[in-house]
Amino acid sequence: MSKPKRPPFKMKFDIGTIKHLGLQMYSTLPPVIGELVSNAWDADASVVSITIPTTPLTSKSEIVIEDDGMGMSDIDIREAYMIVGRDRRKECGDTNTQKGRKVMGRKGIGKFSAFGIAGTIEIETVCDGEPSRFEMSMEEFERNKVNRELEMPVLPATGKVKKGTRITLRNFSKFRNKSISIDTLRRALARRFSVISEKNFRLEVNGKPITPSERDLQKLLDTDVEGKKYLWKVENEEIMPNTGWVVNGWIGALNRTAEVADGIQRGIVIMARGKLVQEPWVFDATVGQQFALSYIVGELHAEFVDEAEDTIATTRNSLVWDTEANAAFKKWGQEKVNRIARAWAERRSEDNEKDLIENPIYKKFKEDTERHEGQATWRVADKLIREIVKKNPMATLEDQLPVVQICMDFVEFDAFKELAEEMGRAEIADIPKLIGLFRDWEVIEAKEMMRVTEGRIKTIEKLQDLIDTNALEVPTLHNFLKEFPWVLDPRWSLIADETTYSQLLRSEFPEPTDTLEENKRIDFLCVGEANNLVVVEIKRPGCKVSLKELAQIEAYVGFMREHVMKSTDPHMSYKTVIGYLLCGESVDTGAVRQRRENLERSNIFIRRYVELLSMVEKSHREFLQRYAALQKAKKRGVSDPKVSKSVPTPPKKPATAPPKPGRPGKK
């Protein structure tokens, strides 16, 4: 005899409530899965298995959350599950489960969380051998929003569930055509549940259990020079005397070089009943060492926030902070975070100073300082280095090295000596003075660079004079470009004359006998610049470049690129070959312009003699204006507006005069 047909499940609802509890409150996967895992824990499940697609989600994709808990009977579904907002603890009392677990759920709204990412939720459950299966659809809720009641037919069992509950999510509104990061989900779930550490509860994703080590952030904490972790333990601390409001856990500082993209949210999570009740935060602390908060992580357990009074927000991932207990907790947390941030900064400063003393570059600087014992400049520079290192605890050893190098570079400059004497009469620990010193360093760099700039302009004017008088003989221009390579590219300063390559091009590409006099080349020049071999074909000022000459320079560069690629000599190897054609004019046709654009994309450039002076002046114009403004501001005794808002980054080593002819070697 067949069983009688079971009547549909009925749920009375308000569509605004359903949307708020699902679509608006839950928009990411970890909290959605977290709510369903909490329900499985309350059902005394030993294993919760989550199956996530490893390919981009499509209209046919499914996410499955299955547990081996006690499941729900027909009566459980009708009289409990179908009641929106049912407070389990108030109705049944705050008693433990049959396995003695403290119940995580409370409000009876976690079942709607999946609507934040999916349009359909299928529930199949088996209790004492009795299966039940039905489907909740956001589309159906919308269709019945006026009647405010939804009937869900009892569906035939699939046979996939022998015990417990299986929830299947479909019709995803989020992640469509995107892949879900399994590692990120595992980390997030590991941090949401401390019960993962318990022996009788296993949470797995795609068949692989999440282990306690995956939620152990302490292994990622920074260590000091003695190898001790930046860790502060909290053991049975009562946040307010005689209240019984006790906190346990730990707070620490991540390694300063840790990537933000590692998927670890900075901040301290708060746990109650083995579940996250407050997303990572720092108690709204406003410590002076604000930068320290960027490294703080931790986990605190505070059972009192989820006891008799419900002080957890509706989203179940943050606390309501205006209750007496939680307000006291927040005050305690702010004070704790402030003390830890200060302690972190002090320990970091001590570590930085110890690292500095052992650093080879600083040791060299100290040796130089001792040799200049009678000069106040060196002593002040040493004080400056120590103060900067001490006042910048978040910097790594690598960050500190430029400070030492800057002082070594600047200490010989006249402007720095004057500045050092001024600082020698003041308290070096005076922070405003230090800020002023950084600003003046910009003036120092500007002054030294201006000397180089003026020299370069005079050099280009000399070249202009040579062009105007047509005094362009082979050795003159060849040596000129070799000595002053920035004429062709302002970024170049050090090059080496590659005479072997120059001779190779002359032999491979002799000048045709029928070439007009004004179009003849003066010479080939091949120079080495860092990892680049630069091929320069020097034409006469009267040469007017056409497609023919463009094809020739392309052939020269192509030949040299092939030759370099085949070279086995480690001292003659280059990664890139760049070409330049130095000429008087260029034919102005569409074909020539197009060919030049194509060549530039392959690092072959055309330079006209008349362009060289304007190029250098343009590349240095902003700098010269900047220097003039700095000088005026210094005379008026006011800060430069561009640097008055914050301490500028110490400048790089000032540019030096262009090198003399010769082969300085590869960089």
Image (tube, grey):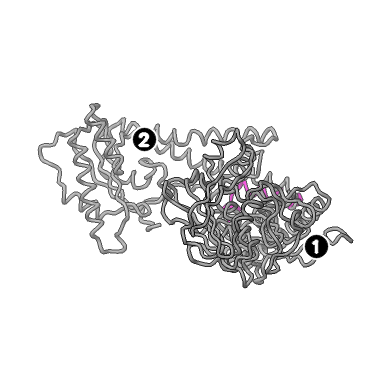
Q: Nearer the viewer, residue 147 or 599?
A: 147
Residue 134 image position (x, y, % from top left) = 53, 51
What's the magenta region?
408-428
Say what amino acid the circle numbered 2 marks.
Leu
Element on which disc 2 rests = helix
Number of other residues with Cα within 10 Å of mark 1, as a class: few under 14, some 14 to 19, many 20 or more: some
The answer to if 316 sits in the magenta stretch is no
Nearer to us in this view, 117 or 591: 117
Give the side of residue 183 with respect to residue 509, left or right. Answer: right
278 displayed left or right of 611: right
**Horizontal and vertical percent position of residue 16:** 63, 37
Residue 11 visible to an observer of this rendering: yes
Q: Which of 234/653 is in front?
A: 234
> Percent x, y for residue 498?
29, 54
**What residue is pinned by disc 2?**
612
Relative to residue 593, is residue 445 drawn left or right?
A: right
To which quarter of the image does residue 237 belong? bottom right
On-image quarter of the C terminus: bottom left
